[in-house]
Image (tube, rainbow, N blue to C red):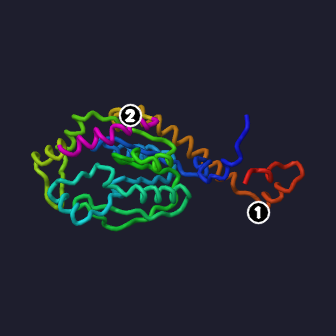
Amino acid sequence: MSIDPSLYADPNYFKVSLKTPMAIAIAGGADSRKKAFCDALTARLNKKHATKVALLSLTQFYRELSPKERIAYEAGDFYSDHPSAFDFKALETALCSLLAGKATTVPEWDASNHTRKGTRVIEPVDVILVEGTLVLYQQEVCDLMYMKVFIDEDSDERLARRVRKTKVRNGHVLDIKEVLKEYVEKVKPMFEEYILPSKKLADIVIPRGTENTIALAVLTNRLEQYIESRTEQKKKDVIIPGATELFATSVNSSYKNIPK
C-alpha cells in the first residue's frame, strides 16, 4: 500500500484525533427533543467525568431578518426551518475555532422576538454537541462532525408536543389554531423537503429520543472511551523541552522524513 504524501498538506487530514474535541451533530424534526437528548447525554457524562461539554443550538445561528422578512415573520409567513434562515458560515467558523481548542464567541438568540440578544464565550472543551433541525443539511458543517445522529421521532408526537407548549411570536402567544396553521403550512413542508432527507447522512438513527435509554447508554460509553483516551494523551504530551528536536536528529529516526 502506498501513501500519497500530498494529503499531509491538508490541515484537516487528521482533524479527528485525541487532541481535537469530539463534535457530534444531533439532528431531527422540530419538537423531537434534540436539546433534551443532549442534556441527558451531558448529565450521564458528568456523573463519571469532570467533562467540559459545549452545546450549540442551530437556532443561535439564525440570520437577522431584513425589514421585508421582519414583516413576513410578524404576519406568520416566515419559514424559520428553511435553510436560508440560518447563517451556516457563522456556525462553521465557530465550530472550527472550538475544534482548534480556542475560546470562542457565539451568538445568543431571543426566540420570542426572533432577534439576536448578545453573545457568550465558550472556553475550550472536550466534547461539542450541535443540535438543530438542519445541522446535517450543510456539507461543510457535516464534514466537521465526528459523529452524526438523527432523532427519529414520530410526527404525531412532535405535533402533540408543539400544541402543548407555549408558542410565542413577536411577543404574541399563539392560540391552538395559529399553532396548527403554522405546522401544516410551514413546519411539516420544511421537514419533508429539507430535514427528513438529511436523515440519510446520519451515522446513527435513534427512535424515541430520550426515551431510548439503550441508545443513550451506547453513546455515553463511546464518549467516555474517548474522554479517557484524551485524558491519557494529555498526560503523555508533557515532554522534556527539546526532546522532539533531539529525536529528529538521530541517525536512524524517520521523524524528519514526515511529509511536509
Magenta residues span 185-203
Instruction: Please indicate, yes or no, whether residue 35 appears anywhere in the rendered image.
Output: no
Rendered residue at 38%/39% (across/down):
198
Tell me the CA gap for discs 2 and 1. Answer: 47 Å
Residue 232 image position (x, y, % from top left): 64, 48
Rendered residue at 46%/46% (across/down):
142
Quarter in which the C terminus is drawn: bottom right
Q: Secondary structure at mark 1?
A: loop
What label sits on residue 151 in the rendered view?
none
Rendered residue at 32%/53% (across/down):
84
Mark 2 belongs to which amino acid? Ile
Mark 1 belongs to which amino acid? Pro
Prevailing SS of the magenta stretch: helix
Q: Which residue is mark 2?
A: 206
The residue nearer to you, when weighing 87 against 120, is 87
Locate residue 74 relative to residue 201 in the image: left or right.
left
Rendered residue at 71%/47% (across/down):
5
The residue nearer to you, when weighing 93 against 221, is 93
Q: Are marks 2 and 1 in contact (CB under 8 Å)?
A: no
The residue positioned farthest toward the bottom in the image shown? 118
Locate residue 77 relative to residue 253 in the image: left or right.
left
Which label's residue is closer to the chain start, 2 or 1?
2
Q: Which residue is mark 1?
A: 241
Residue 35 image position (x, y, % from top left): 35, 47
**Location of residue 3 (image quadrant):** top right
**Location of residue 41 (image quadrant):** top left
Any magenta on residue 202? yes
Instruction: Please indicate, yes or no, whether residue 143 appears anywhere in the rendered image.
Output: yes
Residue 124 image position (x, y, % from top left): 52, 59
Q: Nearer the viewer, mark 2 or mark 1?
A: 2
The residue nearer to you, when weighing 126 against 23, is 23
Any magenta on residue 187? yes
